[in-house]
Image (cartoon, grey):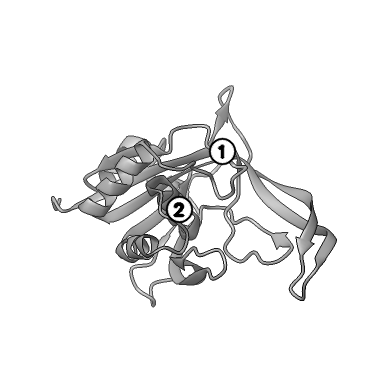
Amino acid sequence: MCADTACLVLRLEGPLQSWGTTSQFNRRNTDLLPSRSAVMGLLCSALGLPRGSGEERDWLTRCVVLRMKAVAVPRLCRDRELAVRRLEDYHTVLNTPKAGGGSKDCHITRRQYLLDAAFYVFLSGGRPVLEQAAAALQDPVWGLYLGRKCCIPSAPVFAGLFGTEEEAARRCLPRPMDELIWVADAPSFDSGEDSVPDMPLSFASAARQFTLRRIVRHHGTRHAP
């Protein structure tokens, strides 16, 4: 174990969650696991970094080398696993501005959410940046949300800072990693199986910027009896 590296674990659990990577305009979908852009946005909120600021850009640049793995874990109710479901909200907004001037009487959007989902996110890399993130999660400057402001965590987001991902998984996960569903950063482009546009460069409201992230997926090896 290298003393200069660590693994930060985030617990993302709540009645509503939404993790979009390709949503645009009036249809806002959610992925089934947390996106890197949302996790980085959560950390920026904890640190109190204004959107589009130089401090935000510097922080996101420092985080590029961090390796992320998002793991789905079961939620239990009376010893039974809750099924994760999608909810679609038919949403209306009055008096939204038009690109050519004036306003629109009513703008309709459809927004998806996950119900009864729970995740652990593992961020591995340099200890100094992860220690700074860990301190901010325990005393956040601004509110922490699970993808959208209406998605409030139902448990503390900070789950621990560990020496390695293996130690973190052993301490946090209810089952071995191989039995669970997860998505992780690919070690190289060739080893990845898909690309998602969720590596944030800037969260500036009028000029958000993202680049592609190569990922690998694991679908779990545990079968229901």
Horizontally, is 159 left or right of 130 in the view? right
Give the answer, above or below, for where 208 lies relative to 10: below
Q: CA distance from mark 2 to mark 1?
A: 14 Å
Q: Residue 126 location in percent, x, y? A: 23, 56
The answer to whether residue 130 is left or right of residue 197 is: left
Residue 191 % position (x, y): 38, 72
Q: Is 167 or 160 nearer to us in this picture?
A: 160
Q: How many marks?
A: 2
**Residue 173, image quadrant:** top left
Q: Mark 2: which amino acid? A: Val
Picture residue at 69% right of the left edge, 52% below the top:
112
Q: Residues within 10 Å of mark 1 (few under 14, many from 20)?
A: some
Q: Residue at x 33, y 66 (%)?
A: 61
- Is residue 147 placed above or below 96 in the rendered structure? above
Please name whichever residue, 23 or 186, is drawn nearer the observer in this view of the structure. 23
Residue 187 is left or right of residue 208, and the answer is left
Residue at position x 74%, y 63% from top?
Answer: 26
The extreme top residue here reads 78
Is residue 155 found left or right of 100 in the rendered image? left
Is residue 145 shown to the viewer in this render?
A: yes
Above or below — where is 124 with respect to 10?
A: below
| Residue that carries the numbered disc 2 in the rendered image | 39
Secondary structure of the residue carrying numbered label 2: helix
Residue 211 coordinates in the image, percent (x, y): 46, 73
Most distant residue in the front direction = 102
State if disc 1 and disc 2 touch (CB < 8 Å): no
* Above or below 138: residue 43: below
Label 2 environment density (alpha carbons within 10 Å; few <14, some 14–19, many ≥20): many
Query: Label 1, on which residue?
Result: 152
Residue name at image x 74 percent, y 73 percent: 99
Q: Secondary structure at mark 1?
A: loop
